[in-house]
Image (cartoon, helix red, strand yellow):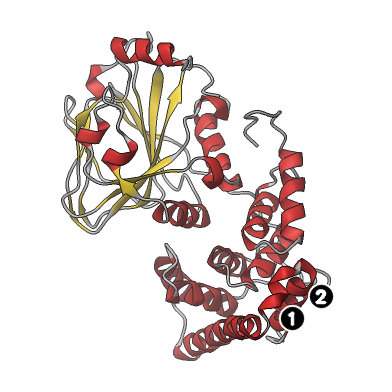
């Protein structure tokens, strides 16, 4: 999808995900489902996407649970059904999948006691079904050596739920709505000098939850990832970081990077790889600018980085703190409090191309809760 070392080819990426998904890899099944839902390398097909999410859910993949809940809530490729939606989200919540608690509350809003009981009972059945698969694997671990035997065992076990809407056979599932690919809100200007804007709901709830999952497995103290003396980030930021590179750069991560580039009418090759910052109590980011000074520009050229200046910085709130944690632009005196899934962008340079010192900003200390930011910068020339 990125074209690093080989030609960028979404259709080929879709084909390769399909090969591994067909062999029963749940992570590939989720990536294939995401590409189908977004129309990446293929036409949009929410019905087929739901089918692949169901196959991944049969193996206990929580990302699939979450996205099936959204599909049943909105009728995307499956019949609209709040009980089914609530049950899948409740199962995700029980295992502490990101964003699931808030999404469950939205699904259950206005439902009566009998419906809430039905959600809990169905969630119990879903959980029990996966436990049945685990017991079967424990009794015959040799099954894992054969992709065909494993797939047969998973499908047979999942079929014991006896739910037509959960059928792994696309032809047997009742029809659902077509839906459309996710689209963010329109940008809203916050300041003309420096140039700052926000975008509500820049990513979907499923994208937000997946980015948090990818980061949570890979957080390290910031100073271990930012040993670059020139950047001073190892001194400025007191929280944890996770770089979403190499194996973490799946279809969803790349699509979010593309979406960032589209905001600036640039290809994703101008977008630096995503990373995630996690601020806990009293973590902060000291006053800093994101553009490169002359010394850093020269150092980059010496190292072979020819992508030039960081023309803009782009943050997406994956989790907003309950108190504190505002982004504060010191010179204009602007404070911005984030909301979940909201993007915040500032241009690092003036329209003339010169660095803009008015972009000096801080990440204020978090007083309650946690703050998670997916962040990247946009370069003036292709990064790859």
| Residue 19 versus residue 52 in the image, above or below | above
Residue 328 seen by the camera: no
Give neighbour class at mark 1: few <14, some 14-19, many 20+ (Cα, 10 Å): few
Quadrant containing the N terminus is top right
Q: Quadrant of residue 378?
A: top left
Q: Which residue is mark 2?
A: 172
* Secondary structure type for disc 1: helix
Q: Is residue 87 above or below residue 361?
A: below
Q: Earlier in the sequence, mark 2 or mark 1?
A: 1
Q: Is residue 35 visible to us here? A: yes
Residue at horizontal 77%, vertical 47%? Answer: 15
**Quarter of the image where one finds residue 384:** top right
Question: Among all residues in the image, which is located at the extreme right?
Answer: 171
Q: Badges 2 and 1: C-beta atoms under 8 Å apart?
A: yes
| Residue drawn at the location 51% of the way across and 44% of the way down | 184
Find disc 1 in the rendering and name its residue: 164
């Amino acid at each position: 999808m990125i074209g690093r070392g080989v030609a960028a080819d979404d259709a080929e990426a879709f084909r390769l995900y399909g090969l591994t998904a067909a062999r029963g890899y749940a992570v590939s099944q989720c990536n294939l489902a995401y590409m189908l839902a977004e129309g990446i390398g293929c036409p949009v097909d929410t019905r087929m996407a739901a089918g692949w999410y169901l196959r991944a859910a049969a193996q206990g993949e929580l990302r699939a649970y979450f996205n099936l809940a959204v599909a049943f809530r909105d009728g995307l490729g499956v019949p609209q059904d709040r009980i089914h939606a609530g049950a899948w989200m409740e199962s995700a919540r029980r295992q502490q999948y990101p964003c699931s608690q808030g999404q469950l509350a939205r699904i259950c809003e206005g439902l009566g006691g009998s419906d809430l009981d039905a959600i809990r009972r169905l969630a119990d059945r879903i959980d029990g079904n996966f436990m049945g698969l685990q017991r079967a694997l424990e009794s015959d671990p040799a099954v894992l050596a054969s992709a065909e035997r494993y797939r047969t065992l998973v499908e047979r076990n999942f079929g014991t739920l006896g739910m037509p809407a959960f059928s792994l056979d696309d032809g047997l599932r009742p029809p659902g709505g077509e839906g459309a690919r996710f689209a963010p809100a329109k940008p809203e200007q916050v300041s003309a000098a420096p140039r700052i804007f926000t975008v509500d709901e820049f990513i979907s709830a499923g994208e937000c939850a997946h980015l948090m999952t990818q980061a949570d497995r890979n957080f390290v103290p910031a100073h271990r990832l930012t040993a670059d003396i020139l950047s001073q980030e190892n001194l400025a930021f007191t929280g944890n970081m996770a770089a979403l590179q190499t194996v973490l750069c799946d279809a969803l991560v790349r699509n979010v990077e593309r979406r960032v580039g589209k905001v600036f009418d640039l290809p994703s090759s101008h977008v630096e790889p995503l990373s995630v910052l996690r601020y806990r109590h009293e973590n902060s980011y000291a006053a800093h600018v994101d553009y490169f000074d002359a010394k850093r520009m020269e150092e980059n050229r010496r190292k072979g980085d020819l992508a030039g200046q960081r023309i803009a910085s782009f943050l997406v709130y994956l989790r907003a703190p309950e108190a504190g944690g505002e982004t504060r632009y010191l010179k204009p005196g602007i404070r911005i409090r984030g909301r979940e899934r909201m993007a915040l962008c500032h241009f690092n340079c003036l329209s003339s191309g010169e660095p803009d010192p008015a972009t000096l900003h801080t990440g204020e200390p978090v007083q309650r809760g946690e703050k998670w930011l997916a962040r990247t910068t946009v370069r003036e020339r292709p990064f790859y």
